Image: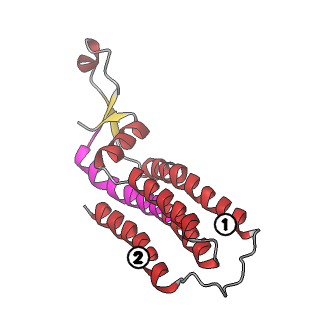
């Protein structure tokens, strides 16, 4: 639940950037032309932040899950003998503990991913503020929102990562 509140708060902050932009940034004719080199530089930085928001959170999550040092045990031979299709050959000794300790690494991963996605919107705000126009800024806002939608926190996703890292069942 906390992760979803956090997600909505960060998503809402990007909407607030738009509100601030409309109240502060005014299209004026006396505004000097922006330095043309800033557009590709800030644009590439935004694309880099977008890429990192898709890659880094999962890597941090997997590393943090490994660091938990959760105990697993081999499944008994009886369970494996006639069911060679079992995906995992181990299970967690204490599945409740594994689930409860999962939340802190998940929270770290969500915060990191959302912060990087929010940075894309901030790049759009910056370009808009510098005078490159609302349309360019809005494109980066839209990219930020798509990234955030793909990172909406779901417990099943984090449990799947946990079972993958330990190659163990949560049952």
Q: Which residues are magenta?
A: 92-116
| Circle on res. 16 | 2
96 relative to 53 in the view: left or right: left
149 relative to 126 in the view: left or right: left
The colour scheme used to paint the residues is secondary structure
How many dots with numbers?
A: 2
Q: Nearer the viewer, residue 46 or 101?
A: 46
72 relative to 124 in the view: left or right: left
- Badge 1 element: helix
Q: Is residue 101 magenta?
A: yes
Q: Nearer the viewer, residue 12 or 96?
A: 12
Residue at which label 1 appears? 42
- Badge 2 element: helix
Where is residue 71, by image quadrant?
Answer: top left
Residue found 23% across the figure and 17% down from its top = 78
Vertical placement of residue 4 versus 131, above or below: above
């Amino acid at each position: 639940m906390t992760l979803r509140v956090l997600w909505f708060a960060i998503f809402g902050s990007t909407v607030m950037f738009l509100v601030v932009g409309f109240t502060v940034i005014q299209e004026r004719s006396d505004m000097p032309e922006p330095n043309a080199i800033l557009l590709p530089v800030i644009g590439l930085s935004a694309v880099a932040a977008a890429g990192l928001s898709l890659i880094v959170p999962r890597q941090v999550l997997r590393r943090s899950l490994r660091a938990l040092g959760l105990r697993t045990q081999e499944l008994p031979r009886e369970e494996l003998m006639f069911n060679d299709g079992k995906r995992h050959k181990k299970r967690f000794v204490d599945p409740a503990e594994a689930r409860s300790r999962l939340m802190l690494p998940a929270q770290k991963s969500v915060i990191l991913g959302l912060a990087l996605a929010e940075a894309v919107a901030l790049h759009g705000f910056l370009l808009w503020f510098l005078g490159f126009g609302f349309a360019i800024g809005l494109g980066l806002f839209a990219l930020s929102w798509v990234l955030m939608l793909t990172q909406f926190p779901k417990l099943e996703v984090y449990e799947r990562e946990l079972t993958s890292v330990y190659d163990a069942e949560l049952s």
